[in-house]
Image (cartoon, rainbow, N blue to C red):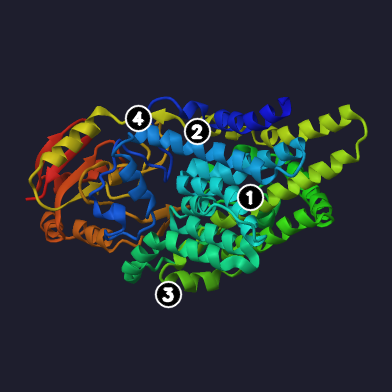
Amino acid sequence: MGRRRLGRAWPWAMALLICAPMLVGGYVLSYDMVFVPRLDVGRADVWGLGSATPRAVPSDAVVAVLNLIVPGWLLQKAVLFGSLLLAGVGAMRLLERFGLGAQLAGATWFVWNPYVAERLVIGHWPLLVAYAALPWLVVACLQVRAGERMRWWRLVVPLAATALSPASGMIGAVLAVSVCGRRWGRGALLALVLNLPWIVAGFAHSASGRSDAAGVAAFALQAEAGLGRLGAALSLGGIWNADVVPSSRGLATATVFCLLLWAVMAVGAVAAWRRPRRRTMVVALVPAAAVGLAIALLGTLAPDLLGWLVENVPGAGLLRDGARYLALLAPLQAVLVAAGVEALTRRLRERVARWSVLAVAVLLPIAVMPDLAWGAGGRLEAVSYPAEWEQARAAIADSDVAGDLLVLPFSAFRAPAWNGGRVVLDPAGRYFPRETVVNDDLVVSGEVIAGENPRARAAARALDSPDPAAALRAEGIGLVLVEEDAYGADDLDSLRNSLTPVFTGDDLTVYAVP
C-alpha cells in the first residue's frame, strides 16, 4: 500500500516542486507565454481568421472560450501545473508493467528533462499540454495495435490535447500512426479530424504561409552539455534560444549524466528486446522517435533543403524549430530508462544496494538539473498587470473610432519593469478587445527574421511613409497604443503630434488616428 501511495504522490511532488512559485496570484509571462485576464472570443485572429499566420489555432480559441467562465490567471495555473502533473501520472501509467522503482525512474526522466525545462521557460504551453498527453496516447494506441476493445475517449482525448497547435498536432499524429502499427488508419483519421481547425485556417492563409529562409539557421538545433548537436537531441535538449537553456546544462555533470543515461537506455533496449510485450512497445515507439530526431536535425544536416521548403511550401515553416519534435523521443526514452533500471537492479542481490541504486536513478535527473525546480530557478514568477492596462482596455472598448489597434513601438517583444525585466511577447497583442496589429518580425542573435503577417508589413510601410497618420488610416488603423516604458517610445514624437489622445497614463497612451 505504501508503494502505491509513493507512486501516486511522486508526480504531484515533481509538479509542485517546479510550479510552486507560479501558483500565487498573477500571470507568468515569459517569451511566448502570454495569458491575459480575458481573451475576447469575438476577435477574428482568435479563430485564425485574421491576417496573421494561424500559429495559435485553436489554442487561442480554447483559451477565449474558457475565459468566459475561468479568469486568465487561474486558467494559466491549471494549464501549467496540470500539464506537468498529467505528464508524470501518464508516464507512471505507461510504465505500469515495470517495478515501482523503475516506474519512478522512467517517470522522473519524462518530466524532469531539458525539453520540459526549455519549453516551459520559452512559454510553449500548448506543447507542454501535448507532451503531457503523449504517454496516455501511447497506452491507448498500444491497445489499438493489439486489437483490444477500448472506450473511444481514451484515444480521442489525448489526441485532442495534442491538437492545440500545428506543431503539437503533427507530433500527436506521428505518434498515433507509429504506435497503432498496422491499425494506423483509425489513429490517422482521428488525428486529421481533430487537427482540422488549424489545417483549414492554414489553407485560408496559404498565400502568406511561407517563411523567411533565414530562420532555418536561426532556429536550428544547438549543441548542449558538451556533446554536440546530436548529443543535445538525444538528451532532449538543443532549443535554438540559448537564453532559456538551464545553466546546469553547461556543467560537466550534465555531460556525465547524459553518458550514464544512454548507457542505462542501451541496457534497457537489450532487456526489453528479450520480453515480447516490452519488445512490442519499443518497436511501436521507434518509428516516431526516428521521425522526431530526423526533423530536429534537418536544419543542421540539410539547411539548404529546409530553407527551400520554408520559402516555397506553405506551412513548411513548422519544421524550422525542429527541436520541438524531440517530444517524440520522450516516451521511448522513458520506457528504455525504466527497462534499464529494472535490469540493473535485478542483478543486485542485497536489498540495500538495490534500493540505493533505485534512489539514485530516481533523483539523479533532479540533482543534475536543479534549475528546473522552483519556477525554473526563479525565472518564472507570477506578476500582475498594471492598473493602467485595464484602464486602457476600457478606453479602447468605449471608443467609437472605427478601425484596428496598432501597438507601438513596433517590435514583437518587451521586457517591462513590472514583469521583472523578463522578456515576453508583447501582451498588448492579446489584451485589448479589438483586432490588434503587432510586429511579427523576430530578432535572433542580431539577425531579423521576417514575419509572415502581410498586415504587419503594411503597417511598417505606413510608419515609414512621409505622412504616417494618413497611411495608417488608409490601412484601416483607427487607434494607436504606445507603451511608454518600451524601448523606442521616445522616438515617436512626430507621429504623436498628428494623433488625438484618447487615454493618457504613465505607462500606456492610446491615440485615435484622425
Task: Out of 343 and 142, give the one closest to the viewer.
Answer: 142
Task: Out of 466 and 267, give the one closest to the viewer.
Answer: 267
Q: Secondary structure at mark 4?
A: helix
Q: Position of residue 491 (x, y in %)?
A: 23, 45
* Structural distance between the alpha carbons of marks 3 and 4: 41 Å
Q: Residues within 10 Å of mark 1 (few under 14, many from 20)?
A: many
Q: Nearer the viewer, mark 1 or mark 2?
A: 1
Mark 2 or 4, nearer chain start: 2
Which mark is on residue 379? 2
Mark 3 or 4, nearer chain start: 3
* Structural distance between the alpha carbons of marks 1 and 4: 33 Å
Which mark is on residue 312? 3
* Structural distance between the alpha carbons of marks 1 and 2: 20 Å
Task: Out of 1 and 198, give the one closest to the viewer.
Answer: 1
Residue shown at 54% from the left, 50% from the top: 154
On screen, residue 23 versus residue 2, left or right, reads left
Amino acid type at image mark 2: Arg
Q: Position of residue 199 (x, y in %)?
A: 40, 64
Residue shown at 65% from the left, 43% from the top: 93
Instruction: Tell me where residue 221 sits by quadrant.
Output: bottom right
Amino acid type at image mark 1: Leu
Mark 1 or 4, nearer chain start: 1
Q: Residues within 10 Å of mark 3 (few under 14, many from 20)?
A: some
On screen, residue 97 versus residue 425, left or right, reads right
Residue 394 visible, this angle: yes
Disc 4 designates what residue? 418
Amino acid type at image mark 3: Asn
Disc 1 designates what residue? 236
Residue shown at 84% from the left, 56% from the top: 274
* Structural distance between the alpha carbons of marks 2 and 4: 14 Å
